[in-house]
Image (cartoon, rainbow, N blue to C red):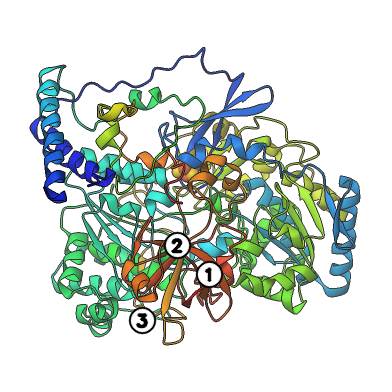
Amino acid sequence: MKFSRRDFIKACAVSTALVSAGCSSGRQPVQSKPIDPTKTEADKWVKSVCRYCGTGCGVMIGVKNGKVVAVKGDPDNPVNKGLLCAKGYYLPQIMTAKDRITKPLIKKDGKFVEASWDEAMELITQRFKESLDQYGPASVGFYGSGQTSVDETYVANKLWKGCFGSNNVEGNPRLCMASAVAGYMTTFGADEPMGTYDDFEHCDVFFIIGSNTAEAHPVLFSRIVDHKRKNPGTKIIIADPRRHRSHEIADSAIPFIAGTDLAILGAMAYVIIEEGFTDEEFIKNHVCFSDGANPITWEDYKQHIKESYTPEFASAKSSIPVQEIRKLARDFAEPGKNTMTLWCMGINQRVAGVFANNMIHNLHLITGKICKPGSTTFSLTGQPSACGSVREVGGLSHLLPGHRLVANAAHREQIAKIWGTDPAKMAPAPGWHTMELFRRTVTGDLKCLWVMCTNPAHSLPNATFYHPGLEQTFLVVSETYHPTLTSKYADVVLPAALWCEKEGVYGNTERRTQHMAKAIEPPGEARPDVDALIDFAHRMGYGEVFPYKSFEDVWNEYLKCTTGTDMELASYAALKEAHGIRWPVKDHIGTEGTGMRFVAPDDPYVKEGVDFYARPNHRAQVFARPYTEPAEMPDKEYPFCLTTGRVLEHWHTDTMTGKCPAIMKAVPTSFAEFNSKDATQLGIKEGDIVRLVSRRGTVELPVKIERPGIPRRGLIFATWFEAERLVNAVTTDAVDAASKEPEFKICAVRVEKV
Amino acid sequence: MTQERKKSIITILILLLFSSLIVSACSSGPPVPQGEISETDLKLIDIDGFPPEVPHELEGRGDCLVCHRDGEIGGVPKTPHPEFTTCRQCHVLTDALN
Ligand code: SF4
């Protein structure tokens, strides 16, 4: 007989339960390791922010002999109060990786050769000038990132939109946040969550949909875990077609058929209305209704829900029993309880992403579970500064700084004045959104593209389709590492300073703007991206409107773009001192910032009670949205649904996490995770290699069966961080009609044994 | 003896071992509130280098604290911060996913 470790653990688990039951307060006092200052070998500790996710954990960077030797959680940062996740702790290892580039590279006869900065910048200048002269402003594009510092996108935006007259400025937040932006814009008239992380500690019911918080936002998850431990009555409901690590603390799970979540959200509204959970007072004072084109009444909206979203309909679509849908709605709407919805890419990366966002907001608005501590609608952001450096700076083709719009003449006028540029030079129509921008590389309409701090050849959906486009475009890639899938196609690669090798500012998910001090020098000839952009602006003949000598100069100009808007930011001095400040910061004064938006006394723009002041009628809009399915559902030929996502250890295209040996040992390759019944039916087992085939492409992946998560039957989950196993060759580039965000989360595949 | 029976006996032995722990744990030390993480505790987490890796497979051992809370079983390392329960947030596996 073998008494396996599994049996042993089962026995232990029972015993532990007994220990706790028998003697619940008998544990020895916590013996935390005391700080021994003599053991901490760093010469200095520098306050900064984690380089990875949108949580925006504060870190202290230990520096010795000009090298990063340690990273610790900043105990004074209210975001993480000293905690980090594994990615944060391993940050020192990304700094010294062997494939860091330290000199500019120019491709000559298909080979990269080292060049001087002057030579590289002259070549870029010449090619951009030729393109602008011959083909006009639309022929030059910029593709940035939610990982750039605020100043970098700000300068690029000004140069392209203000000086070149090209609105073809995009960034990877289009791939992850655009639907959330459009959701907040349409419902509340202003982008970004009104709540904050503080709401976690006041929340009674967490409704988590389309987010594996435990792995994508680990420190936020541990705040939820901690809150639930202190308040055992806290309910956690997870709606997701895949059982994942976040379910460890779930009270109930709603494993709907992937792609049918709009039916669930609609049916929740149905039950809320039918069973009388609505907050008529709140609706009367703060809500209006729309069918997407025209105003409608509360009665019209109720009629729409009644006709389109019966629980029976939702049950038939989603496979969730009617009673469970009703229970979900009751849990969500329970009177006297505070409810928060958290969501992430499962909702946003969808052709109905904006509808889904609106429908989440609807639930909070009709129940009045909003604008109270612990009651709010909170979209989780993937990147450290998608909010700060792209949404707020206006680094997308339709935006201008300070939540302004390209298409609004007054907005163009205001920004041109601050920029010192000619408003007539600015194009009045939005530029190409991300997928269109890359399509135009394939058609040849886009001649020159500068890609900064991101890896689109790996991260775009249907990626291989766009590779020939990248090959033929004059491509500048500002990168820290080389080669990446994208830098391979570059004509010029510029060596970029990384993270704490430069000064910068990030803005996280909860509107918190955080300063990052420079801690060490970049290696070799690597420079901050902003230096390269300012140098480029001077060479292109726009030097006089780019007179900046320091980060502070850029910040002060950007600050003017936010004056008098709904997102006034903090002053440079205040940011340097504080551990992050949440906007709006009225008149840029102080370090306090704003907790809850749209609510007095937190929000300095609200006199009394709740005021959705960003909407012309001061009311949030509830939208009647039709049930919409994904662009591609499984069928006979492609019978499985593929969804992609993260593991805790890796981040995006693993250009950084792939440099950390411990992480690579833990999760060395991407994988495809199957439900055991599907695996049996397919005749595949753990460790086999399978080929996933979609209408667009194929990828071969090692099989895992029901680990680390459990996808429901018919669903395959795959990680996508590995360049050699390019899962994005398979995903679909169908986009949401309004947000233009692609539907990474759902496509149809078949499985072939290899 | 059937395999199942042998397993049950070992299980019972382990349970007995734990019962003795209950007694000793209950009789020593002042009672401490469960699950509180104070600001000072957080400040005391001092990471020199990286959080230790998990050098063994999990095999269904989702709850690390079963063994590592007290460290009594087989001399496994005792966590200095049992109040944190999302262990794999910081401690990565060396090979469990392979
Ligand atoms: S939770 Fe996010 S921000 Fe915090 S340490 Fe982990 S990756 Fe960094």
| Residue A473 horizontal/vertical position (percent) | 79, 69
Among the two numbered marks 3 and 2 on one chain, the one whose residue lies closer to the N terminus: 2
User: Does residue A435 lie above or below A609 as drawn?
Assistant: below
Judge if badges 3 and 2 mark residues of a common chain: yes
Q: Amino acid at mark 2?
A: Met
Q: For mark 3, give the secondary structure.
A: loop
Q: Position of residue B26 (x, y in %)?
A: 11, 23
What element does badge 2 sit on? helix
Judging by the rendered image, the residue that carries numbered circle 2 is: A345
Q: Is residue A278 in view from this perspective?
A: no
> Residue extending furthest top?
A38
Badge 1 element: loop
Front label number (2 vs 1): 2
Percent x, y for residue A700?
55, 68
x 47%, y 77%: residue? A749
- What is the three-letter code of the residue carrying label 1? Glu
Q: Nearer the viewer, mark 3 or mark 2?
A: 2
Q: Which mark is residue A626?
A: 3
Residue at the bottom extreme of this rendering? A636
Q: Residues within 10 Å of mark 2 (few under 14, many from 20)?
A: many
Q: CA distance from mark 2 to mark 1?
A: 10 Å
Q: Is residue A598 above or below residue A440?
A: above
Closer to the eye: label 1 or 3: 1
Front residue of A642 and A675: A675
Q: What separation in Å lies between label 3 and label 2 (alpha carbons)?
A: 21 Å
Could you say which quadrant of the image residue A518 lies in?
A: top right
Could you tell me residue A303's position as x and y percent? 24, 83
Q: Reading the chain from its start, which is encountered first: label 1 or label 3?
A: 3
Would residue A532 be found to the left or right of residue A514 on screen?
right
How far apart are labels 1 and 3 at the CA level?
Answer: 19 Å
Name the residue beneath numbered marker 1.
A741
Give the mark nearer the N terminus: 2 vs 1.
2
